[in-house]
Amino acid sequence: MTWLIPCLAVLLLASVPAHAADYRIDPARSHADFGVRLLWLSQISGRFEEIDGDVTLSTLHDTAIVDAHITVDSIHMSSDRVRRWVLAPEFFDVSHYPSIHFISEPVSLTLLEKGGDLDGTLTVRGVTRPAHFELLPSRCPLAEPQQCVIAVKGTIQRSDFGMNGHRTALSDRVELGMMISLDYAKR
C-alpha cells in the first residue's frame, strides 16, 4: 500500500553518480501505514514494519525507479482480533499473497525537494493496478542517504484489489502513507 514512498528515496541521490541498485530501502527505519473508515465513524489503521527494496538511478535521464516490497505479515494493529481479520482471505489473504509490491515509473530527481506526483504500479493480492501518490517535499543531504526520510501519501480503492468484504461497514477508500529511509546497497 504505501509502497509508494520508496520512489522518493530515489530522488535523494540526484547529485551522486550511481549504478543500478546502489541504494536500498533500509527496512529497519522504514514503514508503511494504512487507514480505512469503519462505519464511517471511526478509523481502522495499521503499520507494516517490514519494507525492503532497491533504488535504481539513471544518470542519463536524471531519474530514479523504486522497487519496493512490503511483508504483509509484518502488520501491527491495536487489536489482535482485527489483525487476524485483515490478514484473512477476505482482505490481504496473507497465506496466498505474502507481499505487496510497488514499482515506480521513472521519477525526476528534482521532485524530491519540491514534492509532486509519484506514479507506478501496485500489486496487492496478486492484482496489479496503476497507482498515483503524492511525494511530499523533503530536505535531504544527497551525499548521505542515511540522513533522509522520504514521505509519500495517497489513496486506493480496496475493491480494485479484490478486497470486497464488509462493504456496508468499511469504506472502499484506503489511505496509504510511507516513511522510507535509504542506505547504500551492500556490495
Image: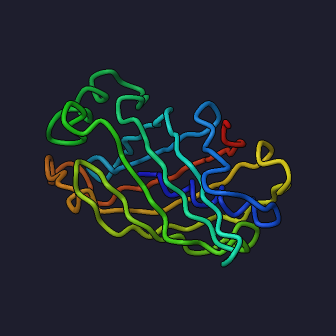
Residue furthest top as drawn: 80
Name the residue: 69% across, 64% down: 11
Which corner quadrant of the image does residue 66 belong to? Answer: bottom right
Relative placement, left or right, of 62 versus 131 is right
- Nearest the viewer among 125 and 32 is 125
Relative placement, left or right, of 77 versus 185 is left
Numbered-mark total: 0
Q: Is residue 136 above or below residue 148?
A: below
- Nearest the viewer among 177 and 39 is 177
Which corner quadrant of the image does residue 44 belong to? Answer: top left
Which corner quadrant of the image does residue 117 belong to? Answer: bottom right
Residue 84 appears at what percent x and percent y?
A: 25, 26
Name the residue: 42% across, 29% down: 74
Q: Is residue 125 above or below residue 171?
A: above
Relative placement, left or right, of 166 versus 46 is left
Name the residue: 47% across, 37% down: 47
Quarter that holds the C terminus: top right
Residue 162 appears at what percent x and percent y?
A: 17, 54
Residue furthest bottom as drawn: 61
Residue 59 appears at what percent x and percent y?
A: 71, 71
Name the residue: 44% across, 67% down: 120
Residue 88 appears at what percent x and percent y?
A: 19, 32
Q: Is residue 21 above or below residue 52?
A: below
Relative placement, left or right, of 59 versus 71 is right
